[in-house]
Image: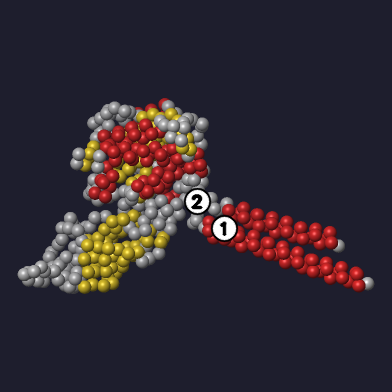
């Protein structure tokens, strides 16, 4: 009888442990869903081609004393020199001199050396000189879309740490449904993965601080090289580093499908509205509640006008915006200080990842705000017709809404590591408690049976 009880206890314990292990295996598989292996297969030796954008008569973006073809060459050369320090890697540049070179020629060069990846180096500018931030353009072709997405997310994380605003990893299609950007399209036609790194906007003050001199361009090259080293899991005997584990910590993607999050949305934000909360005509202080949403892509910028859209403030980053995670805050509080003598008509625009915007309703005020007078001045209530776009308004903001999450990939889910680990600990504790309850019960029963036999 004693041996039979022990066998029963052992069986029950084994069943409990097995069930816990199965449950743990099923749940812990989700722990790594936020980190995945590199989708792109490569040989032992990696071949990388760096393409300095523009050259020769193609100057690229110009702003002040900066010419893009010169900036890209400095960044590309630095990137080249850094990558040459790693083991088992062949690094090439499409050109090292200042000359004209077609996009097809650049792609053919990469295909000729059997490149594992072609990185095209660029800087950005916008028509109205208002945009800022860093972005990576990738292919809309499989499997290059997945390759570019995984590298782009890794690279933009590094750029974010440097302080740049993120504009996302995305692609753009032409009217034929193929890649819009020629270097990516030409490379894909030759079975070469390619992408474009737009480091920052050279014509916007918040980005211009990163490129004040050649060292700024070189620093971007070092960041680019480090991202490539981590993406491919390179090692360097000279530097004493090993990034092989980094190639297993990438965003989930599949070579057999496009990452939906990279497909450019062609619709404006779905909702944008403003509501007046407080107004003080004497001090000029106005408090607004801003609500907006885009159900396809995150919001990244906003700006506002106090003269019905005749002039606009500079673009500001949307509160809580993160182009990699797809997060943004759907509601926030905006405090403005209206200049004296102005009778404002306030309207706000919300911009999404595709730089498309939706305008809010207009808040019209019944009277002009009081003009703040200095010593010896008389107050004038005459309304000021307009305020120049360059005139800055004092403003502050505070997030008061909820964070909206956009899916970054089909396989991606929210990080629930802490909750799952806690649940597993509770399951293990339950198994142990159950085992000792059963064991105690069996021992008590055994003791009773033993006492009955010996009384007889």
N-terminal-most mark, 1 or 2: 2
Vertical order, 144 against 333 (above or below): above
Q: Secondary structure at mark 2?
A: loop
Q: Quadrant of the image for the N terminus? A: bottom right
Residue at 27% in and 32% down: 55
Any part of residue 401 in sight: yes
Considering every residue shown, the one lying at the far right of the view is 456
Left or right? Give the position of 164 relative to 378.
right
Residue at 28% in and 72% down: 277
Vertical order, 378 against 49 (above or below): below
Q: Which residue is mark 1?
A: 421
Judging depth in this view, the residue of 105 and 180 nearest the camera is 105
Question: Measured from the top left, where is residue 58 in percent x and y?
Answer: 25, 33
Vertical order, 190 against 334 (above or below): above
Question: Measured from the top left, where is residue 229 in percent x and y?
Answer: 44, 37
Judging depth in this view, the residue of 367 and 391 nearest the camera is 391
Q: How is the image coloured?
A: secondary structure
Any part of residue 61 in sight: no
Question: Measured from the top left, where is residue 328 in percent x and y?
Answer: 38, 58
Question: Measured from the top left, where is residue 49 in percent x and y?
Answer: 39, 32
Judging depth in this view, the residue of 132 and 443 nearest the camera is 443
Residue at 34% in and 59% down: 319
Residue at 61% in and 62% down: 426
Q: Which residue is mark 2?
A: 34
């Amino acid at each position: 009888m004693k041996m039979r009880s022990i066998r029963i206890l052992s069986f029950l314990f084994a069943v409990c442990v097995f069930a816990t292990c199965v449950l743990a295996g099923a749940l812990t598989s989700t722990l790594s869903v936020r980190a995945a292996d590199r989708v792109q297969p490569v040989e032992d030796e990696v071949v990388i081609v760096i393409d300095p954008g523009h050259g020769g008569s193609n100057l690229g973006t110009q702003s002040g004393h900066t010419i893009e073809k010169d900036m890209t060459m400095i960044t590309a050369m630095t990137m080249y020199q850094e990558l040459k320090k790693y083991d088992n890697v062949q690094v090439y540049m499409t050109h090292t001199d200042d000359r004209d070179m077609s996009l097809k020629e650049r792609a053919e060069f990469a295909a000729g050396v059997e490149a594992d990846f072609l990185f095209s180096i660029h800087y950005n500018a916008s028509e109205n000189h208002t945009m800022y931030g860093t972005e990576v353009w990738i292919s809309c072709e499989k499997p290059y879309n997945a390759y570019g997405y995984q590298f782009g997310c890794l690279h933009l994380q590094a750029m974010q740490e440097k302080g740049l605003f993120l504009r996302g990893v995305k692609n753009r299609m032409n009217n034929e449904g193929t890649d819009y950007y020629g270097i990516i399209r030409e490379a894909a036609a030759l079975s070469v993965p390619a992408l474009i790194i737009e480091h920052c906007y050279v014509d916007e003050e918040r980005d211009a601080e990163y490129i004040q001199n050649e060292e700024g361009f070189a620093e971007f090259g070092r960041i680019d090289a480090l991202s490539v080293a981590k993406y491919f899991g390179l090692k360097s005997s000279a530097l004493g580093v090993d990034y092989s584990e980094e190639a297993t910590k990438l965003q989930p993607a599949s070579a057999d499908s496009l990452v939906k999050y990279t497909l450019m949305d062609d619709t404006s934000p779905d909702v944008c509205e403003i509501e007046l909360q407080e107004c003080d005509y004497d001090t000029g202080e106005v408090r607004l509640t801003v609500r907006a949403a885009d159900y396809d892509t995150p919001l990244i910028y906003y700006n506002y006008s106090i003269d019905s859209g005749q002039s606009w403030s500079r673009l500001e980053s949307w509160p809580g915006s993160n182009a990699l995670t797809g997060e943004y805050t759907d509601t926030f509080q905006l405090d403005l200080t209206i200049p004296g003598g102005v009778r404002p008509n306030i309207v706000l625009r919300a911009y999404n990842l595709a730089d498309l915007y939706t305008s809010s309703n207009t808040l019209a005020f019944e009277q002009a705000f009081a003009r703040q007078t200095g010593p010896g001045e008389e107050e004038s209530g005459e309304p000021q017709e307009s305020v120049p776009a360059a005139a800055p308004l004092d403003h502050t903001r505070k997030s008061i809404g909820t964070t909206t999450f956009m899916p970054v990939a089909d396989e991606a889910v929210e990080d629930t590591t802490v909750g799952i680990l806690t649940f597993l600990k509770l399951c293990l504790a339950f198994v142990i408690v159950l085992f000792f309850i059963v064991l105690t019960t069996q021992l008590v029963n055994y003791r009773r049976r033993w006492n009955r036999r010996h009384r007889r």
